[in-house]
Image (spheres, rainbow, N blue to C red):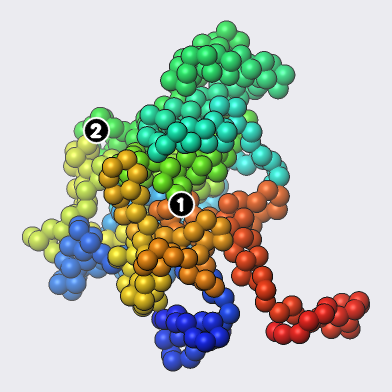
């Protein structure tokens, strides 16, 4: 039954869900899996939206799923600014290019060329890094493949957490970086000498890192690889990978475009080596593979409030998303073709998006690229909003908060208080905590709304094999929600066997 839920209230039998059209649905249990909110605008985004609202020639498109953005009214040939170059950026660009009839063709040189339909706008993109999200390595891992960490183990991180709230950069990151260094250099050793020699390499490195500490891991991994005859690897520096143009400047857009094309071509080459056989992408895949252990450190107040806000959410979470959650390499091939066609331009790193009162349009520029300023009639925010109870205007959210059924979770570890904006919940099966801190019976919260108290709640894999955390969460919710409910009778004619005992529906 489709419809917008606007209120959830208790009644004598359980719960009653009210829809926007006035219909009401009774329920014994309710699972709230409301996904990404469309939050209210604040700060610079509110100012940009107000600027567009006051000028007939300017359009501001707020952050949302690309499928839900009003993109069809953007005029062909007009200039469009796109803020952010993550996964949603690729969806927005696709909607404005192939979604308007353009297509890609092989260029005979190993790349693609874009064949426009003539209905595309000119796209001007920018972000902090100045780089479209890098590609994930070609998948070489079977659905049931599991990574077993040697340094960044659940046991080690759990033991660290047992001593009290952690500082992410001091206590957690060195072990994760050490694990990545191990995989980066070990993969190169395997590529040259095979799996048995790689195992000898790893055993030697692990022993030395445990003796000297995780801060020595890069030096140990590199020096040991050199003793094994692998000397050609560039240092693995995730900060540099996340901001490759930091501290660099360019005399003009053409020079920056050439540097960006070279960077994307190198990333494509690394991605083609794969996420198991390619040193770089195998190392970055570690971030994906050990997310569960990261949660062991972070979830439910594992970090001090300051480190949670600044080190983890302010630094690591964006870095993780940028380097380890990329699109398939086909998207990067297409991006290179669009850059070459001139329909897509990246202004440069540390891009600034401002309102230009003189022209009545938006201005996009990078201080690191001379002559990069562009004037655009439309600005699209290609960033998906995060969970924030205070900024979520959805009627259901506002009613749940007003009724005291949903409260936001605050990290108060380490002498500070940091309100994350995510819904406060119990441990599995994730009942919300009401305004007095008590679990709400018969009600569950699954996924994105709990982001804050927990981490990386936005992905539920449907592939066979090992369960993701999201799948385990859903199973825990389902088991508790169904406990004690009447069993559904099954007709013998449909099953070929006896009917289940117990009535109900």
Secondary structure under tag 2 reads: loop
Numbered disc 1: secondary structure: loop
Residue at (22, 38) in percent of width and height: 369
Q: Is residue 382 left or right of residue 206?
A: left
Dot 1: within a 10 Å radius of its alpha carbon, few (fewer than 14), some, or many (20 or more) residues? many
Work out which quarter of the rendered image holds the C terminus and state it.
bottom right
Residue for point 49% across, 86% down: 11
Residue placed at 47% from the left, 36% from the top? Answer: 161
Q: Where residue 26 appears, x then y in whole percent? A: 55, 86
Total labels drawn: 2
Front residue of 205 and 295: 295
**Residue contact between numbered discs 2 and 1, judged by CB atoms under 8 Å:** no
Outermost residue on the left side: it is: 358
First of labels 2, 1 by sequence position: 2
Residue 153, percent from left and from top: 57, 32
Return the residue at label 1.
Answer: 454
Q: Nearer the viewer, residue 130 or 404?
A: 404
Q: Position of residue 108 (x, y in %)?
A: 56, 42
Residue in the foreground of this view, choosing between 72 and 438: 438
For residue 370, side relative to residue 184 (left or right): left
> Badge 2: few (under 14), some or many (20 or more) residues near its Cα, within 10 Å?
some
State the CA–CA distance, disc 2 to disc 1. 41 Å
Instruction: Residue at the far bottom: name it.
Output: 22
Image height of 395 relative to 64, above or below: below
Q: Which residue is mark 2?
A: 250
In the picture shown, does residue 100 fall above or below 253? below
Residue 280 makes an appearance in the image:
no
Residue drawn at point x = 71 percent, y = 79 percent: 486
> Is 323 above or below relative to 195?
below
Q: Position of residue 179 (x, y in %)?
A: 53, 28
């Amino acid at each position: 039954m489709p419809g917008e839920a606007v209120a959830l209230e208790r009644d004598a039998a359980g719960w009653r869900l009210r829809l926007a059209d006035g219909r009401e649905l009774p329920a014994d249990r309710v699972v709230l899996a409301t996904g990404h909110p469309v939050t209210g605008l604040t700060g610079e985004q509110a100012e940009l939206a107000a600027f567009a609202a006051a000028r007939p020639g300017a359009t501001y498109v707020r952050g949302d799923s690309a499928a839900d953005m009003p993109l069809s009214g953007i005029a062909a040939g007009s200039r469009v600014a796109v803020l952010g170059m993550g996964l949603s950026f690729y969806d927005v660009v696709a909607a404005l290019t192939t979604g308007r009839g353009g297509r890609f063709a092989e260029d005979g040189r190993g790349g693609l060329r874009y064949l426009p339909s003539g209905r595309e706008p000119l796209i001007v993109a920018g972000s902090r890094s100045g780089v479209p999200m890098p590609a994930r390595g070609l998948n070489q891992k079977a659905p049931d493949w599991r990574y077993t960490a040697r340094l960044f183990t659940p046991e080690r991180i759990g033991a660290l957490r047992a001593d009290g709230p952690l500082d992410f950069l001091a206590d957690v990151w060195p072990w994760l970086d050490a694990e990545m260094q191990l995989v980066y250099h070990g993969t190169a050793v395997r590529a040259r000498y095979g799996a048995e020699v790689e195992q000898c390499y790893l055993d030697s490195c692990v022993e030395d890192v445990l003796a000297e500490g995780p801060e020595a891991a890069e030096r140990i991994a590199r020096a040991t690889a050199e003793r094994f005859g692998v000397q050609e690897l560039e240092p693995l520096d995730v900060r540099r990978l996340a901001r490759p143009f930091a501290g660099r400047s360019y005399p003009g857009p053409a020079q920056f475009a050439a540097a960006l094309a070279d960077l994307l071509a190198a990333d494509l080459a690394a991605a083609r080596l794969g996420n198991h056989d390619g040193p770089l992408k195998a190392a970055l895949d570690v971030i994906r593979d050990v997310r569960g252990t990261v949660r062991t450190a972070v979830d439910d107040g594992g970090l001090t409030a300051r480190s949670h806000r600044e080190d983890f959410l302010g630094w690591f979470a964006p870095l993780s998303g940028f380097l380890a959650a990329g699109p398939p390499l086909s998207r990067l091939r297409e991006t290179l073709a669009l850059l070459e066609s001139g329909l897509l331009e990246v202004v440069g790193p540390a891009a600034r998006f401002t309102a230009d009162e003189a022209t009545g349009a938006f201005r996009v520029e990078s201080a690191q690229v001379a002559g990069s300023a562009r004037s655009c009639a439309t600005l699209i925010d290609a960033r998906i909003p995060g969970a924030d109870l205070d900024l979520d205007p959805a009627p259901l959210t506002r009613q749940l908060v007003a009724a005291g059924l949903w409260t936001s979770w605050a990290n108060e570890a380490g002498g500070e208080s940091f309100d994350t904006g995510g819904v406060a919940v119990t441990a599995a099966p994730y009942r919300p905590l009401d305004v007095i801190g008590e679990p709400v019976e018969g009600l569950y919260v699954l996924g994105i709304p709990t982001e804050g108290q927990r981490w990386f709640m936005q992905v539920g894999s449907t592939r066979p094999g090992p369960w993701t955390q999201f799948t385990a969460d859903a199973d825990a919710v389902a088991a508790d929600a169904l406990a004690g409910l009447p069993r559904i009778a099954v007709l013998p004619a449909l099953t070929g066997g006896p009917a289940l005992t117990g009535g109900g529906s």
